[in-house]
Amino acid sequence: MSKGISILAAALLILSAAVVAAAQTTDTKVPPTPTTVTVPQTPTTTTVVTQTPTTVTKTVQNPDGTYTVIEYPVGKEVQVTLNPITLTNSKAVATILRDDNGTRISLNVTGVPADVSAINLYAVDDTGAVTSLGPVVVANGTGKFSGTTALSKFMLVAAPDESLTTYDPNTKVFFRSAVPQGFAVIPHTTSPTGETVAATTTPGTTPASVIAVPMLNIPAYKKGDDTKLKVDFTGAMSGARANIFIEPHKSGKDTEIKMVFHDLKQAPQGQTYILWAVSPDNQFFKLGQIANINDKNEAEIKATTTLDDFGLLVTMEDLAAVKTVIVPAGPRLGVIQIVP
């Protein structure tokens, strides 16, 4: 009996061990299979920076600065420095304003040597034509000029010569305009565009020097105000028009003369127009001149004189002899008279 119990107990013990072994085998953990989760990625944005090129207008001129013609904008005041060429210790600055009535020029010069008695201002356009703007009034080392021109494209030169007709790099000048920052030089041209005025000549006109020129009775004019005169032209300037403004100054003896030409006929080749002041004793004084004007039909002469009374006369003279002529030698084109 006890033997059977022992055998049964042994069997139970073996069965228990097997159950425990099975349980241990079941408890063995198998690593889980990794789960792949797909997370949407934010799209990568590529930023492209586009740089807009900046255009900078640079000053352009001849390397030696001898040609500095620019076009002046309408309604914008432009300050222009005039580089000293022979008056190296002097300074000159012009203020230029172009509007519907023309181009106004104001010039201030400082440091003028005591031995310089005359400075004359000229405009040189893109064809090389020289227009006299008038004398710079010099006193105590300073000089001033104020005037108007019909030109819109030009450079300024100030010279000792009171009858400059041509300009090149070898011309003797006191000052020459520089190119203001932001402006470009207008190319030099020999074929200007625009309306061309034709020239006509009337041969055999009596020389001006033998014709009486009436005095204008300047002492009777109102000081500090201008008196407007008119003139009828003949010969090569037949059909042209001009207004003359005469202003005796309140202080000093200088009288300002401004002559504005309209519908101006082109001077014949090799000829120039000259405006003269004539004293009561028949002495002649050159006030200004206009060389061959190409396509321009407007011009201006501005000058001053110390004569107490005078007449005004326009003649046509030989361009080659203009520097030496001291009395009118060519034909009379117009005598200025007071219009009732």
Image: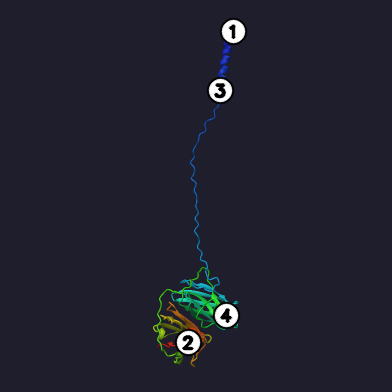
- SS class of the residue under badge 3? helix
Is residue 233 shown to the viewer in this render?
Answer: no
Q: Which mark sits nearer the N-terminus, 1 or 4?
A: 1
Compared to 78, does 200 lie above or below? below
Q: Earlier in the sequence, mark 2 or mark 4?
A: 4
Residue 25 tag number? 3
Farthest-out residue, top: 1
Question: Which residue has dot 2 on it?
Answer: 276
Tag 4: residue type? Thr
Q: CA distance from mark 3 to mark 2?
A: 135 Å
In which quadrant of the rendered image does the N terminus lie?
top right
Give the Cα separation between the discs numbered 1 and 4.
Answer: 151 Å
Marker disc for residue 3? 1
Q: Residues within 10 Å of mark 3 (few under 14, many from 20)?
A: few
Query: Is residue 193 placed above or below 51 in the rendered structure?
Result: below
Instruction: Residue 230 in the image: state x and y as whole percent.
Output: 42, 85
Q: Earlier in the sequence, mark 1 or mark 3?
A: 1
Look at the image and tell me whether residue 120 can be seen. Answer: yes
Q: Amino acid at mark 3?
A: Thr
Evaluate if marks 1 and 3 touch, with contact meaning CB atoms under 8 Å apart: no
Residue 291 percent across, percent down from the top left: 47, 81
Q: Report the number of discs.
A: 4
| Residue type at numbered disc 1 | Lys
The mark lying in front, picked from 2 and 1, is 2
Q: Are marks 4 and 3 in contact (CB under 8 Å)?
A: no
Q: Give the residue at mark 4.
A: 142
